[in-house]
Amino acid sequence: MTQLGRRLAVAAALLALGMSAGSAANPVPKPAPKPATGDAAATGKSTASAETPAAEAEKAVPRFQPPLDPTLGVPPPSAGLLPSPDELLRSGRGMDDDVGDPAFGAFQRGYYLTAFRYAMARAQAGDPISKTLVARLYAEGLGVKQSIKAAAAWYQQAALAGDPAAQMAMGILYLDGKGVKKDKAKAADAFEQAAAWNDPAAEYNLGLLYLEGEVRPRDSEKAAQLFSRSAGQGNIDAEYALAQMYSEGEGVVLDDGIAALWLGKAAKAGHTDAQLEYGIRLYNGAGVPKDAVAAAGWFRRAAEAGNPVAQNRYARVLAIGMGVAPDPVAAAKWHMIAAKAGAKDGWLDDFVAKLSDAERKSAQDQAQSWPAKG
């Protein structure tokens, strides 16, 4: 497995509900983990793409069998093939936007108990999106006592009813073994179904599993296609992963220019590992025109965001005055911060040792007070 494959496989194994996985010193794509994405994540609602899969393709979707847990009091319905997007839309799922929904209205205003009462009534009547909202409230303990098992049970029901936000959430739960028995194969099935709705987070996570090759056949081209679909919808983790694919020529042609383009997109969207790597490309002129000033700016942004490798790179450019005015005290400060986080550098150790006692003391004081509070 290539370096990229190993890094993304680690990311897939470390996905967590509501948070991303990764290491600043060894950057990896950070799954958006977040049970759902965009507006769907904020409210539990989901949106369907206008380009829905053909009925024939839907027949090949893997069966999704959640475990029955009778102790929850809300067991899932009988498992079977999930409905296709077309079938679900024809069934009249959810509520029309112009009608309004008191449950989501209460949720958005922070009236969680009221939201729970309204959503529960609609969920018990069979509305899949209301089931997703009930699950979200249980998962986060909003208006009700937190219960990941109850959340999983309601997510199961909503997923089986066809809500892609719930399918995405179930994939994360199965991946982490939260509320259900850990099962990466079922996580892949859930991501596959949500990806049929063009859910960008599901496409990204499914791409990681195809790249890993454990519960899906290893297929770097398929992974790149999924990353591309997700990145095209603005998923910054997918943008970063796609940049890595183009950088290494895995699943796609090797192209430094395209790799730099996707790194730039992810960097501008706030992906700190992408900011670091985009800065390196700018510094070296790899895939983009060489620009030491812009490189230093990206190193600084990633350093201030807490990336130890970027802190080390920023310390170096400050020490030598490349792309930024030389500042030995600031260089020493960032080196101390980076070294404390594990990014050691013998050359910078020597550089700091040659500073005056007053300069070293100033750098130490600044490093100890970083990050500034308030």
Image (spheres, rainbow, N blue to C red):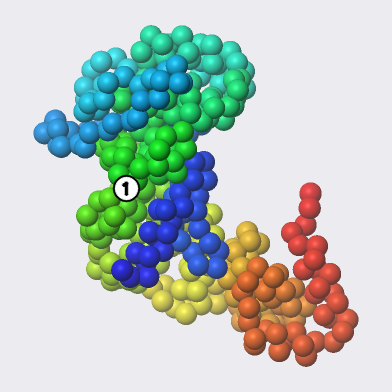
How packed is label 1: few (under 14 Cα within 10 Å), some, or many (20 or more)? many
Q: Image height check: is 124 above or below 258?
A: above
In the rendering, at what x and y percent does residue 83 appear?
23, 25
Residue named by callout 1: 206
| Residue placed furthest toward the right | 358
Residue 356 image point, x, y percent = 85, 87
Q: Nearer the viewer, residue 217 or 166?
A: 217
Q: Is residue 141 left or right of residue 182?
A: right
Dividing the picture into quadrants, the one containing residue 114 is top right
Q: Is residue 145 left or right of residue 100?
A: right
> Where residue 190 sits in the image (x, y, percent)?
32, 37
Residue at x 21% of width, y 37% of height: 62
The quarter holding residue 97 reads top left
Q: Residue at x 74, y 78 (%)?
A: 332
**At numbered mark 1, what does the secondary structure look like: helix, strand or loop?**
helix
Residue beneath the point at 27% across and 21% down = 78
